Image (cartoon, rainbow, N blue to C red):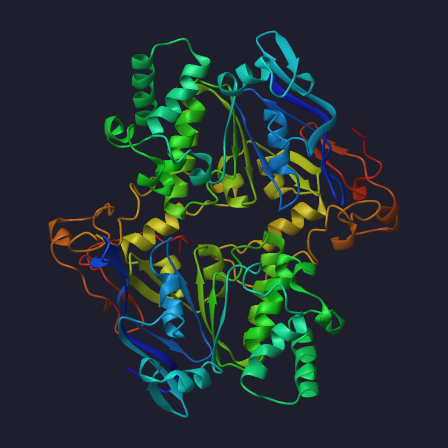
C-alpha cells in the first residue's frame, strides 16, 4: 500500500464576485502518493489552478475562499489540515518552501525584475534555513548548477531580463527546490516555452524527482505533457473531478465521455482523418446547467444527466468516474 | 520553377528591425527577423509554417500582406494569370489586392473591436470596399455566420458575449467577407482549449474544400501543423531550414533542427514514453546570429564547416520538392517522428 503525502477531501474553493459565487473548485477529492507524479488535466476554468492555490493557501484574498473540505498533509507520522491554518500564519509559511513548493506558468511575471536571481533564491533559503549569507550564496550557486544553468557563478548576479525563457523557468525550479521540498506543484510549467526548451525542462523535472524523491503534482492542459510525465491522472471539468485513473488507463481505457472527447480532439502525428471535437464550449461557471455539468456537450447524455449530478462510480481500485453511464457500480 | 499552380512566390524576403541607441536614436544594428527567405505557395494548398518563438514565422506572414513593410525582396501574387509584386503596389492598389489575401490572428480576444457588433465587424471589409447596399451586406453577414457555424440571430451581439472559439469563428467570417483566395492564418488555434481547437481546425478544412482557399498556416504546434498541412516549412532564426511535403518532413526529415523539433514533442501516449536527449541551449539572439549555419551552436552533428560557411537552401531530390539548408544532407541519417 503506497503512502499518501497529501489527501484532499471534498475541497470547495469559491470566489465571491459581484456577479455571483463562482464555484471554482467544488467538492474535489484526490490523493498524492509519496514519490509519484500526479497529473491534473483540464481546460480553462476547470479549477486546476485554483486547486493548487488552495493547497498552497495562496487564493487571492478576500475574493477567493476555501468554503469546505480538508487538505491533509502528512509529515513523518503526523498530519496537518492545511485548510485550518491561518493563510498568513507561521505554520503555512514554514510548510511552503520547506515542505511544498510551487512553480508557475509564466517565469517572467513570477520573478522580481528588480532583484538578481541569486538574491531571490537566497531570500528563499534564508527564510527557511538558519545559515549565513555566504553559505546561502554558495547554496544558490549549487542549485543553479543542478538545474542546468551554465556558468552559475556568473548567472547568480544577473537579473531576470538577462535570461531566456527556459533559463527563467530553470531559476523558478531552482528557487522551488532550494529548501528540498517533498512536494512540488508545477502549474503549466512548460506552457509558455518552446518545444525544444519544454523537453529540457520536463527532463530536468524527472531527473530532480528521482534525485530528491519528491512527489510532483503537474497541472496542464496538454495531454502530451501528461503522457510523458504522470503516473496517475485526475481529469477536471468545471470545478469537479470527472475521472481519476492511472495514466495508462486514461489513455487506453478512458471511461468519462469528456476524457474520451479530449483524447479524440487532439491531432496525432501520423494519423490522418478528421478530428472529432467535443461540441460546444466550456460553460460559464456562473451559469452552470442542472445535473451533470458536461451533459449539454455529451453525446451519451441520458434523461437522468439533465437533472441529477452523478456520483463517483468505482471502475477498479485505481479508477473512478463521475458519470451516470456507470450507474450500478459501487459509489465512492 | 514558377508553374501555373503557384499562387504566391516569395523571393529573398528580408525584414530587419533596426536597433536604436542613444539620444539621437542612432541605428547600431539590426534584428534580422526574416533573413533572405524564398518559397512558393501552390493554389488550394495549405503550407504550414512552423518554428519556435522568434524564428520569424509571424513576421513572414505579415510581410506577405504588407502589414509589415519588407526591408527587401519580392512577394509575387498571381492575379489574372500575371505574377504581380505586392511590394511594388501603391496604397490603393494594395487595398484592392487585400480582397484576395486576408489574415486571421491568434488572439480572438484582442483582434475584434469590443465596441462593434458582430454584424459591423463582419460587414466592415465590405463597407470599406463599398460593396453592396446596407441590406445586401446584412444578408452577406447572415450567410457568413452560418458558414462558420454561428446563428444569424447572433449578429447583433458584441464580442464579449462569445467564447474564445466563437470569437475565432467571427474572425474567420470577417476574413471570408470579401471572398479571398488566400488566407494567412497566424496561430489561429493556439489560444483555444483543446476541445474547441479541433472544431476550428475542422471548420478551416471544410471551408478550404468548399471555397478552394489557399492557406499559409503559421503555428508552433507540430501536431496541428502535421494535421492541416500539405507541405511544411520549418524556420529557425529568420531562415528557412527545410521545406517539403508534410509526410517527408515527419517521416524523413533531413535537417537536424527538424529532427530535434520532432524529438521534442511530448507524446500523448504513456506507452511510447522514451528517454529523449533534448536539444541543448536556446535560440541565439537574432540581433547577433552566429556565423556560418545559424543552427550550428545547438546542432549535435555540427562540424567545422558549419561554423564558417552558411549552407544554402537547395533541393535534395530530383522532383525539386524537398529543400533543406544543411551541408551534410547527404551524410546524415536522421530519425523522423513516424517510423516507417
Report x, y in % for residue B245: 38, 68
- Observer-nearest of A11 and B224: A11
Identify the residue at horizontal 81%, vertical 34% (top origin): A329
Picture quadrant of residue A38? top right
In the visual, does A95 lie left or right of A195?
right
- Observer-nearest of A242 and B292: B292
In the visual, does A149 lie left or right of B165?
left
Report x, y in % for residue B27: 21, 59
In the visual, does B79 lie left or right of A214?
left
State whether residue B319 appears in this view: no
Indicate whether B194 appears above or below A217.
below
- Observer-nearest of A153 and A86: A86
Report x, y in % for residue B75: 33, 78
State whether residue A268 appears in this view: yes
Report x, y in % for residue B15: 29, 66
How many numbered marks does the figure carry?
Answer: 0
Indicate whether B315 appears above or below A47.
below
Identify the residue at horizontal 62%, vertical 46% (top origin): A43
Identify the residue at horizontal 29%, vertical 41% (top origin): B280
Q: Which residue appears farthest toward the front when viewing the image?
A: B23
Q: Which residue appears farthest toward the top when viewing the image?
A: A77
Indicate whether B208 appears above or below A289.
below
- What quarter of the picture does the C terminus of chain A occupy? top right
- What quarter of the picture does the N terminus of chain A occupy? top right
Identify the residue at horizontal 17%, vertical 58% (top origin): B327
Amino acid at each position: 500500500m503506497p503512502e499518501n503525502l497529501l489527501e484532499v477531501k471534498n475541497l470547495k474553493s469559491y470566489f465571491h464576485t459581484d456577479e455571483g459565487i463562482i464555484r471554482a473548485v467544488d467538492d474535489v477529492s484526490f490523493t498524492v502518493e509519496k514519490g509519484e507524479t500526479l497529473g491534473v488535466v483540464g481546460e480553462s476554468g476547470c479549477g486546476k489552478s485554483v486547486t493548487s492555490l488552495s493547497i498552497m493557501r495562496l487564493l487571492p484574498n478576500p475574493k477567493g475562499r476555501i468554503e469546505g473540505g480538508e487538505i491533509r498533509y502528512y509529515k513523518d507520522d503526523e498530519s496537518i489540515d492545511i485548510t485550518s491554518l491561518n493563510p498568513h500564519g507561521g505554520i503555512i509559511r514554514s510548510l511552503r518552501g520547506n515542505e511544498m513548493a510551487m512553480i508557475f506558468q509564466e517565469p517572467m511575471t513570477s520573478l522580481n525584475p528588480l532583484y538578481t536571481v541569486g538574491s531571490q533564491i537566497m531570500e528563499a533559503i534564508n527564510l527557511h534555513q538558519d545559515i549565513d549569507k555566504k553559505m546561502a550564496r554558495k547554496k544558490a550557486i549549487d542549485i543553479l548548477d543542478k538545474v542546468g544553468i551554465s556558468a552559475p557563478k556568473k548567472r547568480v548576479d544577473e537579473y531576470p531580463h538577462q535570461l531566456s525563457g527556459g533559463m527563467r523557468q530553470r531559476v523558478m525550479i531552482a528557487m522551488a527546490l532550494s529548501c528540498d521540498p517533498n512536494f512540488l506543484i508545477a502549474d503549466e510549467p512548460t506552457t509558455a516555452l518552446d518545444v525544444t526548451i519544454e523537453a529540457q525542462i520536463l527532463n530536468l523535472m524527472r531527473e530532480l524527482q528521482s534525485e530528491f524523491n519528491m512527489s510532483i503534482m503537474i497541472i496542464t492542459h496538454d495531454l502530451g505533457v501528461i503522457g510523458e510525465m504522470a503516473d496517475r491522472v485526475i481529469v477536471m471539468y468545471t470545478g469537479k473531478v470527472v475521472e481519476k485513473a492511472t495514466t495508462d488507463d486514461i489513455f487506453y481505457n478512458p471511461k468519462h465521455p469528456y476524457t474520451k472527447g479530449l483524447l479524440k480532439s487532439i491531432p496525432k502525428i501520423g494519423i490522418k482523418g478528421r478530428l472529432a471535437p467535443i461540441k460546444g464550449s466550456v460553460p460559464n461557471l456562473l451559469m452552470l446547467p442542472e445535473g451533470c455539468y458536461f451533459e449539454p456537450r455529451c453525446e451519451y447524455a441520458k434523461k437522468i444527466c439533465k437533472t441529477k449530478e452523478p456520483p463517483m462510480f468505482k471502475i477498479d481500485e485505481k479508477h473512478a468516474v463521475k458519470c451516470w453511464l456507470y450507474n450500478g457500480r459501487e459509489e465512492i | 520553377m514558377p508553374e501555373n499552380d503557384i499562387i504566391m512566390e516569395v523571393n529573398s524576403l528580408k525584414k530587419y528591425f533596426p536597433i536604436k541607441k542613444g539620444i539621437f536614436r542612432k541605428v547600431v544594428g539590426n534584428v534580422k527577423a526574416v533573413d533572405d527567405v524564398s518559397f512558393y505557395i501552390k493554389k488550394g494548398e495549405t503550407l504550414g509554417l512552423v518554428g519556435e518563438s522568434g524564428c520569424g514565422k509571424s513576421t513572414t506572414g505579415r510581410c506577405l500582406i504588407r502589414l509589415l513593410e519588407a526591408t527587401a525582396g519580392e512577394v509575387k501574387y498571381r492575379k489574372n494569370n500575371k505574377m504581380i509584386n505586392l511590394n511594388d503596389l501603391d496604397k490603393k492598389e494594395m487595398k484592392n489586392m487585400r480582397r484576395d489575401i486576408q489574415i486571421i490572428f491568434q488572439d480572438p480576444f484582442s483582434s475584434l473591436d469590443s465596441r462593434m457588433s458582430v454584424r459591423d465587424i463582419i460587414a466592415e471589409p465590405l463597407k470599406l470596399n463599398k460593396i453592396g447596399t446596407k441590406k445586401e451586406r446584412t444578408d452577406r453577414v447572415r450567410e457568413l455566420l452560418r458558414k462558420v457555424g454561428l446563428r444569424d440571430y447572433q449578429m447583433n451581439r458584441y464580442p464579449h458575449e462569445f467564447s474564445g472559439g466563437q470569437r475565432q469563428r467571427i474572425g474567420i467570417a470577417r476574413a471570408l467577407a470579401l471572398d479571398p483566395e488566400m488566407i494567412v492564418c497566424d496561430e489561429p488555434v493556439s489560444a483555444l482549449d483543446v476541445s474547441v481547437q479541433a472544431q476550428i481546425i475542422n471548420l478551416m478544412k471544410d471551408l478550404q474544400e468548399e471555397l478552394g482557399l489557399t492557406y499559409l498556416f503559421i503555428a508552433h504546434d507540430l501536431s496541428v501543423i502535421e494535421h492541416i498541412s500539405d507541405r511544411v516549412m520549418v524556420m529557425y532564426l529568420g531562415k528557412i531550414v527545410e521545406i517539403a511535403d508534410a509526410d517527408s518532413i515527419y517521416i524523413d526529415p533531413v535537417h537536424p533542427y527538424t529532427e530535434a523539433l520532432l524529438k521534442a514533442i511530448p507524446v500523448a501516449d504513456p506507452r511510447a514514453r522514451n528517454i529523449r536527449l533534448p536539444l541543448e541551449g536556446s535560440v541565439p539572439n537574432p540581433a547577433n546570429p552566429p556565423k556560418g549555419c545559424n543552427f550550428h551552436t545547438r546542432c549535435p552533428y555540427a562540424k567545422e564547416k558549419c561554423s564558417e560557411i552558411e549552407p544554402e537552401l537547395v533541393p535534395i531530390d530530383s522532383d525539386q520538392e524537398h529543400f533543406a539548408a544543411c551541408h551534410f544532407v547527404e551524410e546524415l541519417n536522421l530519425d523522423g517522428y513516424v517510423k516507417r
